[in-house]
Image (tube, rainbow, N blue to C red):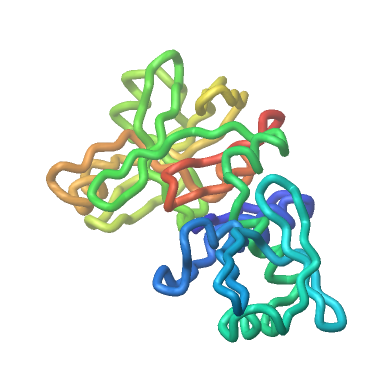
Amino acid sequence: MCWLIPRTTRLLALLGCALLLNAAIPLAAQQEGESTGYRTFSNKAGKTIRAKVIGKKSGIVHLRMSNGITYRVATDTLSQKDQEFVDDWSPAEEQRARLQAVDLKELFSARGFKGVPLRLQNNQSLLEITIAGERLNFLLDTGAQGSVIDRAKARALKLRIQENVGFAGGIGGSAGPMGMALLPLIKVGSIQKKNVTVAVLDLSRIVSGHGKSSKFDGIIGFDLLEDLEAVIDYKGRMMYLREDG
């Protein structure tokens, strides 16, 4: 499944494509290659052809093979099963097959996005972010309105922290006083962002609430995801970020 963090309306079309690309088709109903629209058609004489429907009109169906050759076939010469398939076919089915054949990486690359891998930990997605030359692991949380860095890590990076700007709680209990820090530069994959503001919290209790083996240095929330124009492919464990985001 793909989740879009919208910033501009031009991304809405990508969301539609991504959702269609991941639409499930019962495997029992598919033949090999059927996800791309191709299937094996049989006529009443038992002869077969591997092709896909590209159009139909007045009892004639247009079948195109993978090599580009197109045949006009009288629908009533096909097997009963194939006649029923042709009767149910519509141009929307062809469009759906084309969308399913498109690779997500190719789709987003053509739109100026770069892929960044996500790492699964305790059923949670982690994203590697480089801050002040150090590679850190941030927990991906689309439900968090703001992004956070752990207080101990912020101090180790010698970030300037504005203390006592609020108070926060977490899954594992109270996270205590909240500060704010300005990150002069962050790098996510090949994408760089300057002057990113994040909250500063003691995340030790929140981390413990995610399991004993959990370890992350911060949380990437909706604010930064939106700023990066992020598109998340949970199934493929990838995040796509616009190059000029």
Q: Residue at x 59, y 69 (%)?
A: 41
Q: Position of residue 3 (x, y in %)?
A: 55, 56
Direction from residue 195 to residue 207 in the image, left or right: left
Say which residue appears at 44% left-offset and 22% top-offset: 130
Q: Residue at x 51, y 41 (%)?
A: 239
219 on left or right of 53: left
Q: Choose top left, top right, bottom left or bottom right for residue 15.
A: bottom right
The extreme top residue here reads 133
Do we see residue 164 in this rendering? Answer: no
Q: Number of callouts in the render?
A: 0
User: Is any part of residue 80 visible from this angle?
Assistant: yes
The one of 7 and 2 positioned closer to us in this rendering = 2
Question: Residue 55's quadrant in the figure?
Answer: bottom right
Considering every residue shown, the one lying at the far left of the view is 212
Residue 184: % across, % down: 56, 21
Can you give x and y, in whole percent of width and height, for residue 198 in the image?
Answer: 50, 37
Residue 20 vertical position relative to residue 187 in the rendered view, above or below: below
- Determine whether 54 is above or below 118 in the image: below
Q: Residue furthest front?
A: 45
Q: Return the residue nearer the eye: 105 or 244.
A: 105
Side of 111 relative to 210 (left or right): right
Q: Position of residue 132 (x, y in %)?
A: 45, 16
Which image quarter is the C terminus in? top right
Camera-nearest residue between 109 and 205: 109
Which residue: 65% across, 78% down?
78
